[in-house]
Amino acid sequence: MSKSEYTLVVEVEPHYGATIEPVALDLIRPNKQCEVNLSVSQTITESPGPAWNGTFAWSSKYTLIINFKDKTITAKFKLYVSNPDAKKTKWKSAIENKWSNKRQMEIVEDNSKPNEKEIYKIKVEIEWVDSSLTAHYTIRANASKATEGGRAGVGGTTNMIGWGIGDTVDVPHEFGHMLGNKDEYFTVNGQRFGNGRQTNQGVMNNPSENPHIRHFMPVKKQVAMCLGITEQQCKIINT
Amino acid sequence: MLIKKVTYFILIIFFMITGCKKNIKTKEITKKIIELPMEINKVNTQLSITFNKGIFIVIENKLDKPIIINRFVWSIPSLVLEIQDTNDNLIGMSPPPIPPVNLKDYEILIKEGENLEIPIGGINEIADKITDEGIKIRVKGFYKITEGKDKEVKVFSKWFFIDKTILVE
């Protein structure tokens, strides 16, 4: 939306003899909302065990809401899980605590005015919905025990949409894929990262860690597309 | 003579149509199992998909010695299932989990002549990936023989064709 599309509401009720003084008016600019549906793929090579080598593909799907008044950018995910044992509240907290308010985005909407920068907080929001038909993703809740039902992994998490009932550590990493991030262990698309779960490598290598600036780049790209500006006009900055 | 030929032709068309209908109906069966005899290494993998229950992989050790498989790896749909469209183009599965630090702890032995059934998730993901033309799916995995623990041997099942009719309950 261009600034010329702002909704401006002015109500003036002059009464007899009064002088109307000019007042500063806040422009009421409606939220901008875009549906994101981005294809992502990665090819893993050079894994020590050959099983991880291969090409994986998925879609990054969410609703992007840019609130010009509150200065927030929210990636909202509608998720559905049918298993009543699923720890929906714990998963939601783990994801939102890991990803929300960790970085901000500096946006210059008008290229001719580079000094007019607006700072937006970046948030993620999980909404549990009652039907897979309205969800961005359907989550499978896996049993926690490593050998139960053949499931394995930290707390039972098996991949992006297979979350362990007892897991709040690996789940935020898997969520990072929904946001559009690739894995950052072994060699991915030719880039070498080394083994997973290293220190100071960020959530896409080590789920115990927080996201780094680069992990918000997929959101930056979507914000630029949503606003109809270039990626260069958006910048991820620390909080 | 011409009438006889036309009647014969109509009958063929009729049987083709009814035959096709019957074929479509059989695809509504919710369970399909395929078995691949692997003559080279004699470790078989079976893939069984029951759409209201899940996906099951059976590893049969027909060797005359035990084999080792990693149960973590074999329970991850992204690591053991390969999907292609009908033109042999890869349809990628969602990204796998980060390997646990204790990955080796998940290694288990399958003795000679024994089977192991592993239920895996991924049924929703497979259902989402079925195109109008249908998809091919197979198992891909690795095992090790006890005498050469470092060497992993790749094993495949046959391709298993499924289309949207399998989703009918």
Image (spheres, coloured by chain):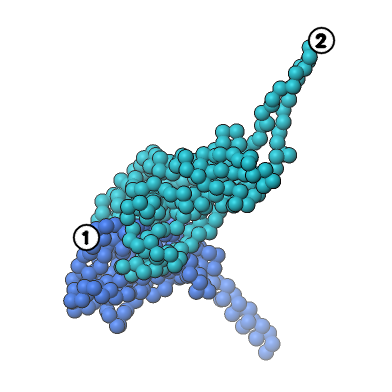
Chain colours: A cyan, B blue
Image position of A29 (left or right of A82): right
Residue A8 pos. (x, y %): 72, 31
Whether A153 is drawn above or below A85: the answer is below
Residue A238 pos. (x, y %): 47, 43
Name the residue carrying label 1.
Answer: B105
Image position of B87 (left or right of B52): right
What separation in Å lies between label 2 and label 1 (alpha carbons)? 88 Å
Q: Residue at x 64, y 49 (%)?
A: A229
Whether A180 is drawn above or below B131: the answer is above
Q: Could you tell me the amino acid type at mark 1?
A: Asp
Image position of B156 (left or right of A11): left
Name the residue carrying label 2.
Answer: A17
Judged from the image, the secondary structure of the residue bearing numbered disc 1 is helix
Q: Could you tell me the amino acid type at mark 2?
A: Gly
Are the numbered discs 2 and 1 placed on the same chain, yes or no? no
Q: Mark 2 — on which chain does it sit?
A: A
Choose between A161 and A100: the one closer to the eye: A100
Find residue A50 and report its image quarter. bottom left
Q: Residue at x 77, y 17 (%)?
A: A20
Q: Mark 1 — on which chain does it sit?
A: B
Label 2 CA crowd tier, 10 Å (few <14, some 14–19, many 20+): few
Residue B156 pos. (x, y %): 35, 74
Q: Nearer the viewer, mark 2 or mark 1?
A: 2
Judged from the image, the secondary structure of the residue bearing numbered disc 2 is loop
**Callout 2–callout 1 Cβ contact below 8 Å:** no
For the N terminus of chain B, which image quadrant?
bottom right
